[in-house]
Image: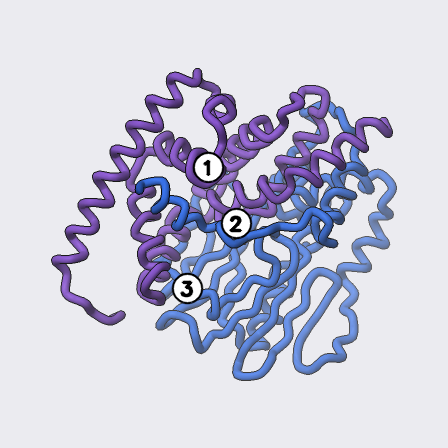
């Protein structure tokens, strides 16, 4: 009886991840591109993007990569803003689609501007020290229609927000934690560039405190 | 090197789904990708340490990655609060079978992490005793005792919540 109840409550009961899917194969390729037995102290691993970072970091041209991030790409699909690191586009009914390449995001403020322009009700908070606390405010739940993740099971891809379906006075908050200087975060950018160590998402009702 | 790669690709192909489900069950879908990626990254680096029966090893690795992730997130963005809040909201948004599942989830959340993990490995990963004990780093007999006690505790919690739900009047979302 207990086991049956537990099985019914399995949040992954209907999940059938496919190892041959493009996303999984991309992950596999990134991992095997790294040396199989490295000294564990070489890099701080914050996410799988770091594997790619390690693989190409030595040959990546810093100036070219910086330019690639800084140069906005033309946006041809309606109202929105995009760069190499993110894309924000307004859709029907106030919905806003957001895609972020967290490994390439070096300017969270630019993402915030794009989100504000799209009236996405999404706040990007930057925490510069992963060991400090960063008050969230009043965390509340949200339905999967209010925020719809495109790639369940992965940090890749983006999400669709429907602010009209947010809880009352709700703001969807992305907290990005910057990697300490000199360490390797999620970024594929050259050492010395601002790098994100991790990020998280929460729905906050009412005021959203800033990280200090 | 080619042999290593072939073995790892086979490992990945065989167990990717299981590791994804393991991660989703513990940290949710939006964070699970990081856990999966880091688990397989560790596996790639320690390929020579992985036994033929690789799944318990992968689960044990994923378990450590999850623990690290939750510690880090609890400092950075209070992930636990977010997950708990999502569950509360989901109760308000849905009804029927989902509410029943969430009642069970709430009972699980009331247990210690050790009890939760024992129950999850048994009911969700459906691991044999030897494999589950391997994941937890304990003896089979210790695992059996833990499982028995955890089942009893969650059973009591479910019985209590069932009794409470029958006492509460139905109400809409505020």
Q: Quadrant of residue B38?
A: top right
Q: Where is residue B173 in the image (x, y as percent from the top left)?
A: 27, 70
Does residue A35 appear in this view?
no
Check the image and name the residue furthest to the left.
Answer: B167
Crowd class of label 1 (few under 14; some 14 to 19; many from 20; radius 10 Å): some
Q: What element carries label 1?
A: helix
Q: In this view, does B83 lie above or below A42?
A: below
Q: The blue chain is which one?
A: A
The residue tagged 2 is: A127
**Which chain does the residue under circle 3 lie in?**
A
Q: What element carries label 3?
A: loop
**What shade has chain B been given?**
purple
A10 on left or right of A112? left
Q: Where is residue B3 in the image (x, y as percent from the top left)?
A: 83, 27
Q: Where is residue A71 in the image (x, y as percent from the top left)?
A: 79, 65
The residue tagged 3 is: A142
**Which chain does the residue under circle 2 lie in?**
A
Give me the C-alpha separation between circle 1 and circle 3. 23 Å
């Amino acid at each position: 009886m207990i086991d049956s109840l537990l099985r019914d409550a399995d949040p992954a009961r209907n999940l059938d991840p496919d190892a041959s899917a493009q996303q999984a194969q991309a992950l596999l390729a990134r991992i095997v591109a790294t040396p199989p037995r490295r000294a564990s102290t070489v890099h701080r691993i914050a996410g799988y993007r770091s594997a790619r970072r390690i693989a190409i970091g030595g040959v990546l041209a810093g100036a070219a990569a910086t330019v690639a991030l800084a140069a906005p790409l033309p946006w041809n699909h309606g109202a929105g803003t995009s760069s190499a690191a993110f894309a924000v586009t307004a859709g029907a009914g106030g919905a806003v689609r957001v895609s972020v390449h967290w490994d390439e995001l070096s300017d969270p403020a630019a993402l915030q501007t794009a989100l504000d322009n799209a009236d996405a009700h999404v706040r990007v908070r930057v925490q510069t020290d992963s060991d400090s606390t960063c008050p969230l405010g009043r965390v509340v739940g949200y339905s999967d229609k209010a925020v719809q993740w495109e790639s369940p099971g992965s940090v890749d891809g983006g999400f669709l927000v429907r602010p009209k379906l947010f809880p009352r006075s709700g703001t969807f908050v992305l907290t990005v934690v910057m990697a300490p200087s000199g360490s390797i975060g999620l970024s594929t950018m050259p050492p010395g560039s601002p790098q994100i160590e991790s990020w998280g998402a929460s729905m906050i009702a009412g005021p959203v405190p800033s990280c200090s | 090197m080619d042999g290593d790669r072939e073995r790892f690709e086979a490992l990945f192909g065989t167990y990717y789904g299981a590791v994804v489900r393991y991660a989703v069950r513990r940290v949710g879908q939006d964070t699970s990708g990081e856990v999966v990626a880091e688990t397989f990254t560790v596996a790639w680096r320690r390929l020579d340490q992985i036994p033929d029966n690789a799944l318990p090893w992968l689960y044990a690795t994923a378990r450590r990655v999850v623990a690290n992730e939750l510690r880090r997130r609890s400092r950075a963005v209070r992930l636990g609060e977010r997950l708990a809040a999502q569950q509360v909201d989901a109760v308000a948004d849905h009804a029927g079978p989902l509410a029943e599942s969430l009642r069970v989830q709430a009972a699980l959340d009331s247990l210690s992490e050790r009890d939760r993990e024992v129950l999850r490995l048994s009911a969700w990963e459906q691991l044999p005793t030897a494999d589950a004990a391997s994941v937890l780093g304990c003896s089979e007999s210790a695992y059996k005792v833990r499982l028995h006690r955890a089942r009893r505790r969650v059973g009591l919690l479910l019985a209590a919540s069932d009794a409470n739900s029958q006492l509460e009047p139905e109400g809409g979302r505020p």
